[in-house]
Image (cartoon, rainbow, N blue to C red):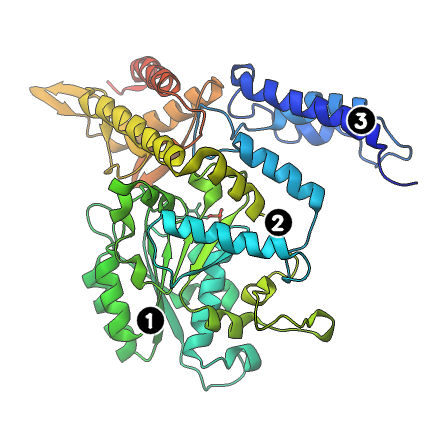
Amino acid sequence: MGDMELDEFRKYGHQVIDWIADYLAHPERYPVMSQVEPGWIRKNLPENPPEEPESMNVILKDMEQYILPGITHWNHPAFFAYFAISGSGPGILGELLSAAFNVNAMLWKTSPAATELEEVVLDWLRQMMGLSDSFIGIINDTASVSTLCAMVAAREAITDFKTRSHGLTGHSKLPRLRLYTSEQAHSSVEKAAIVIGIGKEGVRKVSIDDEFRMDAEALKIAIKEDISNGWRPFSVVATVGTTSTTSIDPIMKIADICDEYKLWLHVDAAYAGTAAIIPEMRYVLDGCERADSIVVNPHKWLFAPIDISAFYCRKPDILRRTFSLVPEYLKTNEENVVHNYMDYGIQLGRRFRALKLWMIIRYFGKIGIINRLSEHISMAREFTSWVDDSSNFERLAPVPFSVVCFRANPWVRKGRLIRNEDEEYLNTLNEKLLNEINATGQTYLSHTYLRGKFTLRLAIGNIRTTREEVKKTWDLLQQYFVKLDKQLRPR
Ligand SMILES: *Cc1c(COP(=O)(O)O)cnc(C)c1O
């Protein structure tokens, strides 16, 4: 009976920490993208659970043998896909401690330190990003959930808090609700619409300008048109750092429109918000002080192990009226003097996520964070200059942060030198190029489509990424481009 013997815990604890340090010291031992076939891991694991206890030794060996090959190494310095993220040293230690405490941060009383540290740390982050103290922070697991919470609150605010009682269906009192976001917005916005009951038709996607930013003029026209057709506009979700190209919507102009039509302005800055910690980059959040809510993910670009999302709201009372539902057994005496975070979101049980962020911010300091984020931006700019100077590659979007959108597109001689205009060929070439360089295991990029063009995305964000890694990826791209262009170019 009982838990693992503490002597044994100590022994394997030391062993696991050593294992992690070796793992982080030798990323070259692992292909960045897992190379296993679908089903490989399941095939290697027993179908039935063990009857008898097994030793930690054997379990850890199996982890190396059967789990590790199926890991795609997001913590690898040559991980450049999606948005590169980091489980930093202090972040990993923070996770370890919060597992040891294993507290539930649902009420202040259920662990005062968890609640108060959440307040302190999110206030630090708010200050570092230069947001006003009218924003109250709440930690969620992901940006998807933060955006969902914002949309639920916006829906309640526009329906006078009646939807939480009466629901959206079965009565005709409510006009159809609509929210606005750009064509480049993250899919979590549409998912939120599905969950809050307005459906995908309740989302109107506003067109973008030539730099992939929401067209504020088009937004206004859409709102007017919808109102005259009987819709009730209630929210705009703008993005600072869109998922494909990291474009920045014109928040100031959008905020004006939201003021005029009394719409809840939510800003999705999941990836790029933390860039505002760099004084020269503070402008990326210009206008956000006028938003009703904003989401920033420390697990994206602030070195926190996944997951932790910081949700800031200027209308905490609305959040509370939206979500609070306190059964008798959860009533406490401190309700008027403390935050009971369960009242501000969907979850009751809440992990102690603030601890790792506290340790990260203290360990690196604001200066250390600024230097690291700046270095990522600088590496991305350097890569951008290589692309811009290349006769075989071209850039497909501006680079405001640390993500570069580009593709192979060689100059060809047609009387004079011009870019290859055979889009079908270019799409095939770039898709093959991506697959082949990812299959080397030495780097990992992802892709998107921009205006019908298969686009390669290099995202820099891992704390251990160096210029050397970025250069190696550039060399690989060139090497595989030459080979594939020879094989594939139509004659
Ligand atoms: C990553 C990202 C999301 C989704 O974040 P999760 O925390 O995975 O839900 C949403 N919006 C933007 C702009 C993102 O970059």
What is the number of the mark on residue 56? Answer: 3
Relative to 277, does residue 145 appear above or below in the rendering? Answer: below
Q: Is mark 1 within 8 Å of ligand 1?
A: no
Residue occupying image coordinates x 60% and y 25%: 36
Left or right of 489 on screen, residue 167: right
Relative to 141, does residue 192 appear above or below in the rendering? Answer: below
Q: Secondary structure at mark 1?
A: loop
Q: Nearer the viewer, residue 321 or 220?
A: 321
Residue occupying image coordinates x 48% and y 57%: 146
Amino acid type assigned to the residue bearing label 3 in the image: Met
Residue 188 visible in the displayed image: yes
What is the number of the mark on residue 352? Answer: 2
Q: Secondary structure at mark 2?
A: loop
Relative to 453, does residue 152 appear above or below in the rendering? Answer: below
User: Measured from the top left, where is residue 301 in percent x and y?
Assistant: 42, 39
Q: Mark 1 highlights which residue? A: 263
User: Measured from the top left, where is residue 85 in percent x and y?
Assistant: 47, 35
Left or right of 38 on screen, residue 61: right
Screen quadrant of the C terminus: top left
Residue 190 visible in the displayed image: no
